[in-house]
Image (spheres, grey):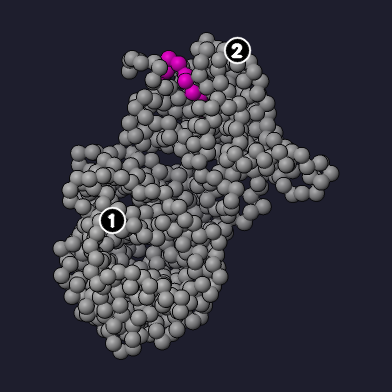
Amino acid sequence: MVVMYRNSTIPTGAMTPMWTSWGRLLSIETPQHPFRKKPFLSTNGTILATGNLKSYGDSCLLSNGTAFSMLFQDNILAWNPQSGRLKVEAGVLLDHILQNFVPEGWFLPVTPGTKYVSVGGAVANDIHGKNHHRVGTFGHFITSLKLLRSNGEAIVCSPSANSNLFQATIGGLGLTGIIDWVEIQLIPIKSSLMDVEWLRFEGIPEFLELNTASSHYDYTVSWLDCTSSKKGKASAKGIYIRGRHHPDPSCLSIHKKPYLKIPFNFPDLTLNKYTIGMFNKLYYHHFPKHKKGTQHYDPFFYPLDQLIDWNLIYGKRGLYQFQCVIPFKHSLSTFQTMLDIIAASGQASFLSVLKSFGSIPSIGLLSFPEEGLTLCLDFANQGIKTLTLLKQLDELVLAARGRRYPAKDATMTRNQFKQFYPNWNTFLAYKDPKISSDFWERVSPQ
Amino acid sequence: MTNLDPDLIQTIVVLGATSAIAKAFIRQCCNAQTKFVLVGRDEEALDAIKSDLIIRKARSIETIVADLADCFRAKETVQAVMARCSRVDLLFISYGILGDNAEALKDNVLTQEIITSNFTSVACLLSEFTPIFEKQKTGSIAVITSVAGDRGRQSNYIYGSAKGGLALFLQGLRHYLSKYGVHVLTIKPGFVDTPMTSAFKKGLLWASPEKIARGIRHALLKKKSSVYLPGFWKWIMIIIKLVPESIFHKTKL
């Protein structure tokens, strides 16, 4: 017996080995081992491969079974500096890719709002970014990947080889097998700076106007003050942000390490509708009507990464995320109703994000993005009160033929899953029988 | 590869190269002047590390698949290493197992496994390397032991005694090799946040493998004899060592 070095001197029993996801709604005690092929194949019972546990709900948790952490699998396997093709093990974090390849003039083709997610997780959730309207999802930039199935098979899939399994794996929530490595196409950049514009808007119609006028910008997103919405009026205020990589050669500096850390759970009262309202007002007025500037990619893409463990601000109770996409024709009315319902509930979302998804169809059978408007909200967990609100919002999503995002979900029901993801039936054929997650146990059609 | 400028080019031999601390250390040492000889048991994992180091522009990387815990193979392993490099600038030993103390009490095969992996096999390998360093009259040896080796505790004394024995062995080796100008470093890490301990609740005492690796590089540069990593463990262990037995026996450490 050699190799894995463990310097823990405290017996395992002395500390409770608990783990949780980013929403911190549920803590579980399932053993979590670093991934090794042999134990993976010989483990009895259900298994799940996990990454950096940044999903908000329970798609990265497994209460009954064995979890294998992929974070130790963090080697770069191949790199072609001419073409920008990068082959990495699944546990490599996006942070790691930026650190190594930004200085060479390459950037992630699609990036979410945090760089601390693993490549395996990025594939499993077919993540999207601020450039969805132009380029689609992360899955569109995967040229091939290797899947380890629990029956011992190792299958390389790509858009052309084993393409059905490839489509099931992109956005497949890690359920089709363990992702061993992934080959990604990076995009060239000349500078680590971004040219950015911030524009104030009032009401979703104004947002839509700006959005149409900004479709040629590579990256667009908007921040919404959901506490500013007045009943019946489409008046929610927000800041529209659009940007692109600075086109002229300049510094290719990488991001700095985060320097602020939330040290402990804040009291539950920290975030309430009054403090949230106040914060949002201050933030809104921080920007003039129209502002232009340059910014490093780090604050542009990853504003919250500056603050380690920011989820502790929500207190011990944890938080629910809610992200849905609604087709364009229903989105205006649906979102306005949603904002009214949220205001009436007395709850408030601290960070609300509004963005349009483009028409490029997602590759994955269970990929979340589809053409329309996506709204992302978060709510501190106030028990039944929050669950009731989420239920009301869900009904609106269903009525508008939209869908919710599993990576940010903790409440979806079996029926809702079937309606949100009509490809579920096709997906079942590719699911690995030994792999599951708490999310899957909750929604899997039986 | 011809060795054009021996003063600049470093050869680093790592025994247990796939461990979290070793990986972090290797990456930090990697540059165009570094030649690596990496030894471990998991061929696939070694190959992955090799690819990673090629992209990080290491001068050369050799891998050897070997069961380091097998004492009878120590000679063979060292010969395999020396067949791939003319000299060793740094020998880094980072393998070992924690084992389960309670289980080992029921089955002495496990006790033997813990002692062999963490102590006997390391001692055999070091003894095989000793004449090489004697002849070289230069170079460093850095070995990972543990804070657990400083005082025997009811929960962990089999592992602790093996690591403590290893620390004592290294102290003697340091004495012996000092007249040959060879530096021997004893590394005593505390809690390290590796994926294997990802299930543990992390507190202030935990450190990342990257931080430990930086500490090791610093200690090597300063030619330290022994180092606690992170440094505050020195003070914790002074206190733990000072607690009288009568009080210590009341604890569950």
Count neighbours of disc 1 (C-alpha within 10 A) and say few if under 14, some if 14 to 19, many if 20 or more. some
Count neighbours of disc 2 (C-alpha within 10 A) and say few if under 14, some if 14 to 19, many if 20 or more. few
Q: Residue at x 24, y 59 (%)?
A: A293
**Residue A190 appears in view:** yes
Secondary element under disc 1, as helix, strand or loop, is strand
Could you give the CA–CA distance between mark 2 and mark 1, rounded to whole angstroms? Answer: 57 Å
Q: Main secondary structure of the magenta part?
A: loop
**Residue A177 appears in view:** no
Q: Which amino acid type corresponds to the residue marked 2 in the rendered image?
A: Lys
Residue B97's disc number: none
Nearest the camera: A65 or A316?
A: A316
Residue designated by label 1: A295
Question: In this view, which residue lies farthest toward the top?
Answer: B135
Q: Is residue B73 above or below residue A147?
A: above
Percent of width and height locating residue A328: 21, 76
- Residue extent of the magenta highlight: B83-92
Q: Residue at x 63, y 54 (%)?
A: A15
Residue designated by label 2: B179
Percent of width and height locating residue A216: 15, 63
Secondary element under disc 2, as helix, strand or loop, is loop
Nearest the camera: A365 or A273?
A: A273
Percent of width and height locating residue B132: 52, 13
In the rendered view, does A47 fall on the left or right side of A369? right
Nearest the camera: A191 or B210?
A: A191
Same subunit, tags 2 and 1: no
Q: Which amino acid type corresponds to the residue marked 1 in the rendered image?
A: Gln
Q: Is residue A103 magenta?
A: no
In the rendered view, does B154 fall on the left or right side of A363? right
